Image: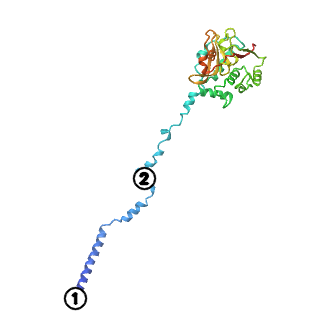
Amino acid sequence: MPSTFKDIGMGLAAGMGIGTLLFAGVFLISEFAQIPDVQSVAAQEAIIPPQLEAQANPAQTLFSTPTIFSVPEFFPTPTPTLIPLEKQSTTLPPTATIITEPLILTGPLNGEEQAYLHLTSLYFVAPDYFASKAIGEEINGVGYGHPSNICGPLSIAILQRGNILSKNIIPYDFWLLNPDNYEDRLILKATFPQERFESFRTKIALDRFDWVSFPLLAGDFLYLYSGSRGNFEHMLTVTRVDDLGRAYTVTNHKTEELGFVITEELLYDPKNPGEGLFYQWTAREKATLGATGFEGFQLFRLREK
């Protein structure tokens, strides 16, 4: 037994010695070689403010690029709707050859008055549907300016702008005017009083009337009767007569290409029968564009001064 206790004691002493040596070795290593603290490094990265992360990572600047490109670079100011408007505006067609043609100096208007009537009538020229509708509504009010039936108000507006009729007259009163109606005859009588205007009525068709013996004059106002062969009645103002006796008007009419427009048109040429609107409107083959004047016309003309 004593020998057994002796062996145990020696084993304990040896174990304590080995443990002492191991402890001393760990202490010496920690002094000369620092072991990195992994947890502390991870925590430091986690608390970096977001703005510092963005600065440290250039890729984050991609999210701000939409503000770099100015809108006009890719989306220019919308203007497509202006282009049609420019095309549809009421621009006057070239009239140099018209203006330079001498006017016939007969009738109640002198040369200066005829020239002024002609010039002011060109204001109403509208060579397409949209421009014609705009002119019609300028004269007659919104919703009442369709170029298919603006002839009456247009004719009165031309006479007003040419200083032949008073500005107090309402062009709208001539919208769809019909002399067969008593009220409309009163309007005609008030607008063209006998002391200032003379009146003439014929039932001879436009294409059969003798325009040499009885020529139209600048400033004349006409109401055209359709007759049984026609499909519409019409009003117009004679805006000029040239030195060859050719009469012109600025009026609304239907065309094959553009529909209803307002343009300056030849009414007749006394030396070339068959030319002008008066012959177009009485031609059977042109009836789809409008037929009138088969029952003649009524004319109101300013009296000589």
- Image quadrant in which the C terminus is located: top right
Q: Quadrant of residue 26?
A: bottom left
For the view shown, which residue lies furthest in the left direction?
Answer: 3
Is 244 above or below relative to 82?
Answer: above
How far apart are labels 1 and 2 at the CA level?
A: 74 Å
Residue at position x 43%, y 48% in the image = 62
Residue at position x 40%, y 50% in the image = 59
Q: Which mark is residue 123?
A: none
Residue at position x 68%, y 28% in the image = 140
Residue 100's spot in the image, x, y percent?
A: 61, 14
In front of the other: 8 or 74: 74
Residue 198's spot in the image, x, y percent?
A: 75, 15
Task: Describe the element under mark 1 as helix, strand or loop.
Answer: helix
Residue 5's spot in the image, x, y percent?
A: 23, 88
Which residue lies under the disc numbered 1? 4
Q: Which mark is residue 55?
A: 2
Three-letter amino acid code at the position of disc 2: Gln
Mark yes or no: residue 25 visible: yes
Going from N to C along the chain, the mark reached first, 1 or 2, is 1
**Left of 14 or right of it: where is 42?**
right
- Image quadrant in which the N terminus is located: bottom left
Q: Residues within 10 Å of mark 2 (few under 14, many from 20)?
A: few
Which mark is in front, 1 or 2? 1
Please give the count of numbered marks on the rendered protein.
2
**Left of 236 or right of it: where is 21?**
left
Task: Describe the element under mark 2 as helix, strand or loop.
Answer: helix
Residue at position x 45%, y 55% in the image = 51
Three-letter amino acid code at the position of disc 1: Thr
Q: Quadrant of residue 108?
A: top right
